[in-house]
Image: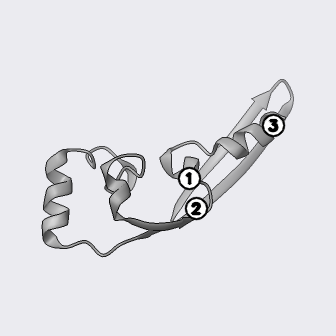
Amino acid sequence: QVMTAVVVCANDDERSDVVTTDVHVLRMSDADIEWYVSTGEPMGKAGAYAIQGRGARFIDRIHGSWSNVVGLPIHAVHRLLG
């Protein structure tokens, strides 16, 4: 599960939201894990995977915002700015 809080402040107006996305990861073999770690991609990533990169092959499905999993829930930001 990925949760991201977003706050937009302008003058005396403050708007906020929390976006939650469920991420279902496929079962990975030891060889899968060793290969993925060897790519260097999971290093420095929250959750140790990049859904927009090589890590996508291990994602079964998501329920919610894909852009939230990447790092910024675009639809929520757009709504808060509107």
Q: Which amino acid does the dot numbered 3 rest on? A: Glu
C-beta proximity under 8 Å, tags 2 and 1: yes
**Label 2 vs label 3, nearer the camera:** 2
Instruction: Find residue 66 and name its label.
Output: 1
Q: Which amino acid does the dot numbered 1 rest on? A: Trp
Crowding at mark 1 (Cα within 10 Å: few <14, some 14-19, many 20+):
some
Question: Which residue shows up at 20% across the image and 44% down it?
Answer: 40
Q: Which residue is mark 2?
A: 21
Q: Quadrant of residue 28?
A: bottom left
Question: Which residue shows up at 30% across the image and 76% down it?
Answer: 27
Residue 36 located left or right of residue 25: left
Residue in the foreground of this view, choosing between 82 and 27: 27
Q: Is residue 78 above or below residue 66?
A: above
Residue in the foreground of this view, choosing between 4 and 36: 36
Helix, strand or loop for disc 2: strand
Q: Position of residue 14 (x, y in %)?
A: 81, 37
Q: Position of residue 35 (x, y in %)?
A: 15, 57
Crowding at mark 3 (Cα within 10 Å: few <14, some 14-19, many 20+):
few
* Quadrant assignment for the C terminus: top right
Crowding at mark 2 (Cα within 10 Å: few <14, some 14-19, many 20+):
some
Q: Which residue is mark 3?
A: 14
**Label 2 vs label 1, nearer the camera:** 1
CA gap, disc 2 to disc 1?
A: 8 Å
Helix, strand or loop for disc 3: strand
Q: Which amino acid does the dot numbered 2 rest on? A: Thr
Question: Which residue shows up at 61% across the image and 55% down it?
Answer: 65
Q: Position of residue 49 (x, y in %)?
A: 34, 54
Q: Position of residue 26 (x, y in %)?
A: 35, 72
Q: Is residue 7 above or below residue 69?
A: above
CA gap, disc 1 to disc 3?
A: 25 Å
Helix, strand or loop for disc 1: helix
